[in-house]
Image: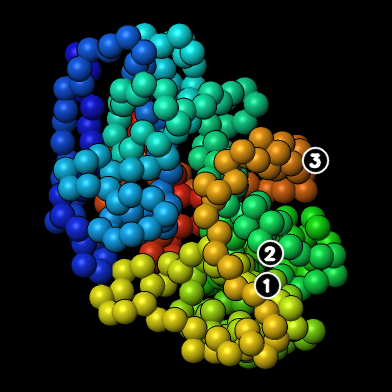
Amino acid sequence: MTTSQQWCLKARPFGEPTNDTWEFKQTELPELKEGQILIKVEYISLDPAMRGWLNDAKSYIEPVQIGEVMRAGTVGKVIKSQHKSFSEGDYVAGYNGVQSYAVSDGTGLHKVDPSLAPLPYYLGVLGMPGMTGYFGLLKTGEPKAGETVVVSGAAGAVGGLVGQIARIKGCRVVGIAGGKEKCKFLIDELGFDAAIDYKNESVKDALKQTCPKGVDVFFDNVGGDILDDVLTQINVKARIVICGAISQYNNTTPVKGPSNYLSLLVNRARMEGIVVFDNIKEYPVAMKDIATWIKSGELKVKDHVVEGLETFPETLMMLFKGENFGKLILKVGE
């Protein structure tokens, strides 16, 4: 039998997840049945959305239940198979949770090729964050060449991709990120036209300087005060894409909504949410486009890999402290 190390939900957090939120288990996995595979998990995706999955509230996806392995995107290797569609040695991506080994019936899995791209890419730029950025910007934001696109959380997995796609589409791109190093990276490495350091300058004032013609598309990963600041600068018929609100996820008080929402009325603007799963049928198109841009050098990838399954609780919190630089991924190790 195979022993899987697992992080399970022990209690629903109030505010930030703590050590009391999680329970570390070692579970003996059952022998495979017909139609099942055993996966050695190699990389685990850590995403802001995971905080929402801990809440017992109505959402686009069922919450993780108490006692269950924490839900997470993974990529790993099939080491045993009783499934006609998967063979030993195949690499697969799916939602197999925060654990070292997983038994699956193949539902939600798809094969990936490590010879075409590094395995972490299938959790980032070619995974859920990549699909989120691609469809959120192009389908919901509808950018047009010459327009100004502003991205919050711009040094994160989704934000960095959004800004680069906007640049590829001929837009002026302004990123909002925390710290001089991240802002320098946005301009020097990812090709943003300007960057705003929300930790060290007034976002509202900086927007006036970096967006002299106003904001046509705002891709928001942060919410809170930054959303309010951008709403003061939007143009007529602007599109505001609500991808996330990481500044609000660990609140112990009600979520802060935009007090400047009447700007939407005055400017006849649109604010719309993006849930990546709505676009599943079109994933192959997005993956082909993104892979083409990577190959041509138009799009650069930044992954932040932390090693050790045992570090999961602390590593997850890097997302909410702004400590990750690029897509945050947990490497399981041996």
Label 3 close to label 1 by CB (< 8 Å): no
Residue that label 3 marks = 296
**Which residue sits at x=70%, y=39%?**
285
> Mark 3 or mark 2, which is nearer the start of the sequence?
2
Quadrant in which the N terminus appears: top left
Q: Secondary structure at mark 1?
A: strand
Mark nearer the viewer, 3 or 1:
1
Residue that label 2 marks = 141
Which of the 4 image quarters holds residue 319?
A: bottom left
Where is 125 relative to 250, above or below?
above
Where is 145 relative to 99, above or below?
below
Say which mark, if any, is on residue 196: none
**Which residue sits at x=69%, y=56%?**
139
Residue that label 1 marks = 239
Q: Is residue 244 left or right of residue 181?
A: left
Disc 2: CA contacts within 10 A as few (<14), some (14-19) or many (>=20): many
The amino acid on which the numbered mark 1 sits, given as a three-letter code, is Arg
Q: Residue 65 location in percent, x, y?
A: 22, 47
How many numbered badges does the structure rendering display? 3
User: How far apart are the two marked residues, 1 and 2, measured between alpha carbons?
Assistant: 6 Å
User: How far apart are the two marked residues, 2 and 3, measured between alpha carbons?
Assistant: 24 Å
Which of these two is toward me, 76 or 105? 105
The amino acid on which the numbered mark 2 sits, given as a three-letter code, is Gly
Q: Is residue 312 left or right of residue 49?
A: left
**Residue 105, visible in the rendered structure:** yes
The amino acid on which the numbered mark 3 sits, given as a three-letter code, is Ser
Label 1 close to label 2 by CB (< 8 Å): yes
Q: Secondary structure at mark 2?
A: helix
Q: Residue 195 location in percent, x, y?
A: 66, 73
Where is 5 relative to 186, above or below?
above
